[in-house]
Amino acid sequence: MVEPLIKDYSSTGRKGYSLPELDVPTTETESLLGQEFIRKEGPGLPEVSEVDVVRHYTELSSMNYGVDSGIYPLGSCTMKYNPKINEDISRLEELVNLHPYQEDNQVQGSLEIMYSLQEDLKEISGMDSFTLQPASGAHGEFAGLLIIRNYFLDRGEERTKVIVPDSAHGTNPASGTMAGLEVVEVESNEKGMVDPDKLREVVDDQVAALMLTNPNTLGIFEEEILEIAEIIHDAGGLLYYDGANMNAIMGYTRPGDMNFDVLHFNLHKTFSTPHGGGGPGSGPVGVKGFLAPYLPRPLLRKEGIRYYWDFDLPKSCGKLHAFYGNYGVMLKAYAYIKALGGKGLKETTKNAVLNANYLKARLSKEFELPYKKSSLHEFVLSGSKQKKKGASTLNIAKRLLDYGLYAPTIYFPLVVKEALMIEPTETENIFTLDNFVEKMLIISREIEKDPDLVKNAPHNTAVKLLDEARAAREPDLRW
Amino acid sequence: MDYISNTPREKEKMLDVIGAQEINELFAAIPEKVRLKRELNIDGSLSELELKRQARKLTDRNNSLNNMTSFLGAGAYDHYVPSIIDHLISRSEYYTAYTPYQAELSQGTLQAIYEFQSMICELTGMGVANASLLDGGSAVGEAVLMAQRITRKNRIIFSRAIHPAYREVARTYGSFQGLEFVEAELRGGTTDLDQFENLLDDQTAAVVIQYPNFYGSLEQMERIQSLLEEQKKILMIVIANPMTLGLLTPPSEWGADIVIGEGQVLGNQLNYGGPYLGYMATRDDRGFIRQMPGRIAGATTDADGNRGYVLTLQTREQHIRREKATSNICSNEALNALIATIYMSAMGKEGLKEVAEHSLQKAHYLADKIDQISGYQVVNKENFFHEFWVKTPVEPGKLIDELREKGIIPGLDLSRFDEEEGLLICTTEKRTREEMDNLVSALEVVSNG
């Protein structure tokens, strides 16, 4: 079924809004602005009624799938349930109806929330100072690398390389480039981990940082982390922690204690703020004390009982957002942390790891598990066996949609062929996990009996398999 | 409340399947040396009721715009947000979804992005738009880097009439890219175009113009356009407030190559500065599109030949191209873009124009009155839209102090940015004549006092 575009409901003169009458004497627009500034034709926006808008976007929402619809096992995305109370708190008018340039003394409640969030993130990570300014994980990576670059610049050291494992998220190398660094890839070993010996080979005095996700994207904890840290630190470089997989370690270990110097969190992963169909996220960055002078401007500080923004940071790496970052997202993360407390956060990690290992134990009987090492909150299967029988990992993913489930992350990490990267999170119960396993097993059997059924999936979604090649070949990007 | 639903008995059963005695065994790979040997020191385990009570306590320490009449703008605007917006974006199929990687089960998000891109193109007059960037500031950063990639030149010409925070963000984005930023001075409330003209050279990648500019003024776009016609290789980047484009000549007609801006004005709450959304539009030209950062949705067909939507042209992006990507952006501001899409649909062609018209008329009404008060002077009387710059007889900080008790925020104290002095005053369609008259009376009192 195809839902028309909103403009297709348009009819000249139809209205979906109401505004008060203009209550001031008016002057002709042309004389206020000059004729050349008045657009000759109004913008081609729809002319529709309120009910048209409501029905159209309600219909579109029915062609979508969220965590509230069911399991969302995307690896490295931590699609946990988004508690409703957090939404309510983030909508409290006294918290929302604030202008970013109101004086600090008028917004003490909000600053206290942000400060408290920073303090909690410090405790969870073992870092000394935080900025909440980055608006996404990748934004946080960029900020973190700029902090590192400014630190070295200040010391008179010109370091131009960043090392990234081949299993890293694509944002890591891309952030390196944004920070003007040359990206050096280091191969994982047969256990799926960074090999200290291989690392030694690529480390030199040009290395500014190593970016690492721990546990890595295979869900495997880098056991040699202290040795890795030593190799980098001995060469004068710094360690950057990608917090995408923080859900695997809360309360068990802290990046600060693993000797990382800089990290970012993804509030929209670990701390349950909803993904919104691709954003907004929030990527707070924490650093060890010696890097604090290089954090972005402004920093939130407390003096006595008063909170204030400090702009006087001569060594700051600059500014990455016009204001203070995605405040609305911070409110939700704050509420989440307060609902759980330290104990609850550890329980979260415990159960995320239990759920992932349960799925792994059941699914690895049917699907190949290329890296056997014990894993934490996520794991990666390969669809290679199934591929030989005629259906690829892409086909398996699409067939899952037919069963009303979302698919895992596929074809990532790049180190696994036909990868299926699965992260159930702690909020799924055994019934939803068993249902996921059952559907995966059914699909595997379908591939044996009737691979075309799987190859031509999906069959039951709002649209059938979409032609991505055509979309790229003949771009149709607007009406 | 920890939102974990498995019971102890179920956990036992799961451990049996795994072949472990207790959950802690699963963490054996974490070396003893890096283990946290104590509990996390974070108070909590609050019930819903306690959490709400705690939040209420904190809200009491805020003085929101519910209690104040605000004339603040400067990149964040107090426009009316229609009721339907929160109702529609509260549908959890939207807000609890991830990036639409599985297109067949994400058609709602994808079609809405396609509509967003289309409406941004309609407003700006440009050929293509992306699915959103992180905010208006970062959009400026992304745009100058894009211009550098397209032109392979390193000089960016700014004007001091651009929002100071946007300039700072762009400089930060360019800090290790070999970019050189030069700034044309102000003359009145607009860019000194004589000086600007002298800055143009064959090393220039792009000029950046804000429309209307930070002080609310419209630059002499015809002159800028003709200057750039003589220097065809220099790109024109325009930072445009999309609300004003309901009324203003679209940037495409001034020859813009890249148009960016802050989309908060399109139905997004003030939210103390975020989440907002950056937008970006450019020429319908492969050379430009290939260098554009961020996600793009496109229409295609499904196996039955029906229309559907996917994320496309992804070979620009980090998950495919890694260090060779056009940007590191991954998460964007999808839900805020959905808000903007619903807003643009509901307001439509006439509604957006009416919002722009009301904001403009009210600003001019207020500016005329303030300019008549002895000691006050509107700097940019000519050609401002809905914001204007006022020189005051007493320090703006003192004015803000005096007016606070009357429940009025008279505007932004420009000394915040260490460049100019005075108040930057903004009106939207929400400000009433009575509120503006009250501001004028209050300023008169201070002037006489």
Image (tube, coloured by chain):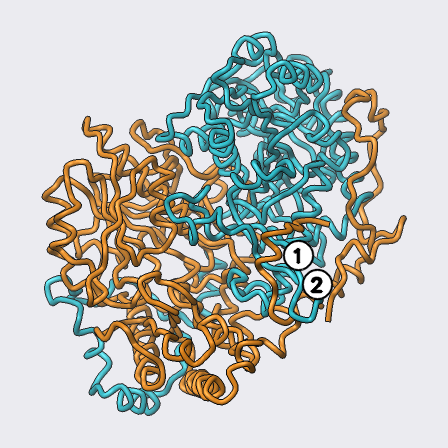
Residue A67 visible from this viewpoint: yes
Residue nearer the viewer, A117 or B244 = B244
Question: Is the residue A290 above or below the residue A91 in the image?
Answer: above
Residue A112 visible from this viewpoint: no
Give the chain letter for orange: A
User: Who's the residue at 43% across and 81% down the image?
Assistant: A389
Q: Which residue is mark 1?
A: B299
What is the C-alpha distance between the residues marked 1 and 2? 7 Å
The answer to whether the residue labelled 1 contacts the one labelled 2, judged by CB atoms less than 8 Å apart, is yes
Residue nearer the viewer, A100 or B288 = B288
Asked which quadrant contains residue A453, the reply is bottom right
Is residue B142 shown left or right of residue B355? left
Give the chain letter for cyan: B
Question: Which chain hosts label 2?
Answer: B
- Which of the two labelled residues, at mark 1 and mark 2, occupies the earlier sequence position? 1
User: Can you tell which mark lies on residue B307?
Assistant: 2
Question: Is the residue B250 above or below the residue B157 in the image?
Answer: below
User: Who's the residue at 43% across and 67% down the image?
Assistant: A409
Is residue B185 shown left or right of residue A263? right
Secondary structure state at the residue bearing disc 1: strand
Residue nearer the viewer, B3 or B203 = B203
Q: Percent x, y for residue B380? A: 67, 17
For badge 2, the amino acid type reads Arg
Question: Which chain hosts label 1?
Answer: B
User: Who's the residue at 30% across and 76% down the image?
Assistant: A369
